[in-house]
Image: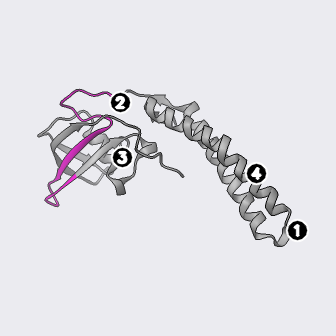
């Protein structure tokens, strides 16, 4: 499966890789070396913790490199009056009589707790390409769904401040 990423996502991932390789990796290796010097490795918690952190850092680097390698670069531009990536959308949930505001982002930056929803989520997919006033059906699965009404769309510039989601 290829991940849909914007050029800004790729740049942020490359920055994180560089930071992890030049700063974090160096510190992690120092921590392992220092902990190893404390003696018996079988009972040395600091050594095991340092090794675990070093391995997690290397895993994150490999993950980001793989994401970049398999990425499909998509445009973050959309029509002025249509929902697209990096747009902030105010949505009215008919069933709950509730209004929520979300920013649509790519999967690697999605964080529903911060109001950032992925364009690959059911709500994100349903909203893409629609306009203010549209009543949109959000299909959760083959048997379940709900309706929302788009109240407003704000074209926001991607300043790169949204954090990449770490796994």
Q: Which mark identifies residue 39?
A: 1
Dot 3 or dot 2: first in sequence order is 2
Q: Which residue is mark 3?
A: 121
- Mark 2 vs mark 1, foreground winner is 1
Q: Label 2 vs label 1: CA separation?
A: 54 Å
- Residue 48 belongs to the span the image colors magenta: no
The magenta stretch is: 76-100
- Mark 3 vs mark 2, foreground winner is 2
In x, y percent, where is residue 142? 32, 49
Q: Which residue is mark 4?
A: 29
In x, y percent, where is residue 73? 46, 28
Q: Label 1 vs label 3: CA separation?
A: 50 Å
Q: Label 1 vs label 4: CA separation?
A: 17 Å
Residue at image position (11%, 40%) is 133
Residues 142 and 82: in front is 82
Q: Label 3 vs label 2: CA separation?
A: 17 Å
Asked if the residue under mark 4 is in contact with the one under mark 2, i.e. CB atoms within 8 Å, the reply is no
What coloring was used for the rendering? one colour
Dot 1 or dot 4: first in sequence order is 4
Magenta span: predominant SS is loop
- Residue 78 belongs to the span the image colors magenta: yes
Dot 4 or dot 3: first in sequence order is 4
Q: Label 4 vs label 3: CA separation?
A: 39 Å
In x, y percent, where is residue 29? 76, 51
In x, y percent, where is residue 126? 27, 41
Element at label 3 = loop
Q: Mark 1: few, some, or many residues within 10 Å (few <14, many ≥20)?
A: few
Element at label 2 = loop
Residue at the left extreme of this rendering: 133
Dot 2 or dot 4: first in sequence order is 4
Q: Which residue is mark 2?
A: 76
């Amino acid at each position: 499966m290829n991940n849909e990423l914007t050029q800004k996502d790729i740049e942020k991932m490359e920055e994180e890789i560089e930071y992890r390789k030049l700063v974090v990796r160096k510190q992690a290796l120092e921590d392992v070396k220092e902990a190893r010097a404390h003696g018996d490795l079988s009972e040395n918690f600091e050594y095991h913790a340092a090794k675990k952190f070093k391995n997690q850092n290397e895993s994150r680097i490999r993950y980001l490199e793989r994401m970049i390698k398999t990425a499909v670069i998509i445009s973050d531009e959309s029509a002025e009056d249509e929902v697209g990536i990096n747009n902030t959308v105010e949505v009215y949930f008919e069933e709950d009589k509730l209004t929520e505001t979300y920013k649509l982002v790519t999967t690697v930056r999605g964080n529903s707790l911060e109001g950032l929803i992925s364009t690959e989520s059911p709500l994100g997919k349903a909203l893409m390409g629609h306009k203010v006033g549209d009543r949109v059906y959000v299909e959760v699965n083959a048997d379940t769904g709900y309706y929302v009404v788009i109240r407003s769309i704000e074209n926001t510039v991607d300043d790169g401040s949204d954090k990449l989601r770490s796994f």
